[in-house]
Amino acid sequence: MQLILLSGGSGKRLWPLSNDARSKQFLPLLKSPAGGMESMIQRVVRQIRDSSLDVELTFATNAVQRDSIINQLGDGLGIVTEPQRRDTFPAIALACSYLSMEKHCSDDEVVVVMPCDVFTEDGYFSTIGRMAQAVSEDLADIVLMGISPDCPSEKFGYIVPECEGEVMRVLRFTEKPSLDKATMLIGQGALWNGGVFSFRLGYLRKLVDRYVQAESFSELRGRYGEFPKISFDYEVVEKAESVAVVRYEGV
């Protein structure tokens, strides 16, 4: 399984500690089990390595943050840098093209995409494993992580599943509703959209070809501006014919 970690935000909520060059995921603000302090990105990678997931890691980031990733995690990881910021669909498309064209991963390879700055529990990663398993069993083209909400919130997008189960077909999405609408959605069994996606590499590669047909990764990266500047949710997930969700009970 290939795991793509998205690292591109500027972390303005922690300004002036964080900025474009020193985003919040790189600040050593968390206590490490080994003693001392660690950053969010170091914590997430440690949790992944301590989990039962058999994965190879690739970071989708920008040129400003590339050195910070290497400084904190070493240079043995795959790192794909955007030539320019164009939102999550182009960033994920570029990273998947790297896996296909540079690492020569099979179209059948299962890919999971997640943010690198989550502060979460170990069960988060076992949920990722269940998502990948659902894709490998061809239960859906795209499998999402849905977080069980503990209160109505206007800050999250909501996923409305068809019914209860281990892997649930998605009926519809609602983006950041009012508190009253959020309360109604939770009553219907809706989940928070966790921003974690799983799919086969070949599924995304076909979408990439609709926009840029390149002979090499360097050519594709040079034509990066031809991708639409749009989120992965809007461009891919909400247009997909077969989408399922796996519930995560933690935070």
Image: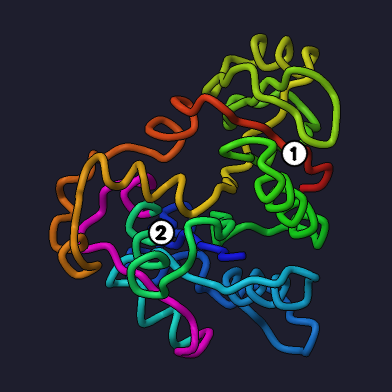
| Label 1 close to label 2 by CB (< 8 Å) | no
Q: Residue at x 38, y 47 (%)?
A: 88
**Dot 1: few (<14), some (14–19), or many (≥20) neighbours within 10 Å?**
many
Mark whose residue sits in front, 1 or 2: 2
| Left or right, 170 with reference to 2 | right
Residue 241 drawn in magenta: no
Q: Position of residue 24 (x, y in %)?
A: 49, 64
Q: Quadrant of residue 40?
A: bottom right
Tell me the quarter of the picture where residue 95 sits.
bottom left
Residue drawn at (72%, 29%) of the image: 191
Q: For the N terminus, which image quadrant?
A: bottom right
Residue type, label 2: Cys
Q: Could you tell me which residue is drawn at 72 percent across and 22 percent down? A: 161
| Image vertical order of residue 28 relative to residue 92, above or below | below
Q: Give the residue pinned by disc 1.
A: 246
Does 239 appear above or below 194?
above
The residue labelled by disc 2 is 96
Across and down, in percent, residue 126 comes to: 80, 57
- Report the amino acid beneath label 1: Val
Which region is colored magenta? 72-91
Residue 85 is a magenta residue: yes
Q: Secondary structure at mark 2?
A: helix
Q: Secondary structure at mark 1?
A: strand
Q: Earlier in the sequence, mark 1 or mark 2?
A: 2
In this view, the residue in front, 84 or 129, is 129
Q: Nearer the viewer, residue 230 or 29?
A: 230
Q: Is residue 72 left or right of residue 158?
A: left
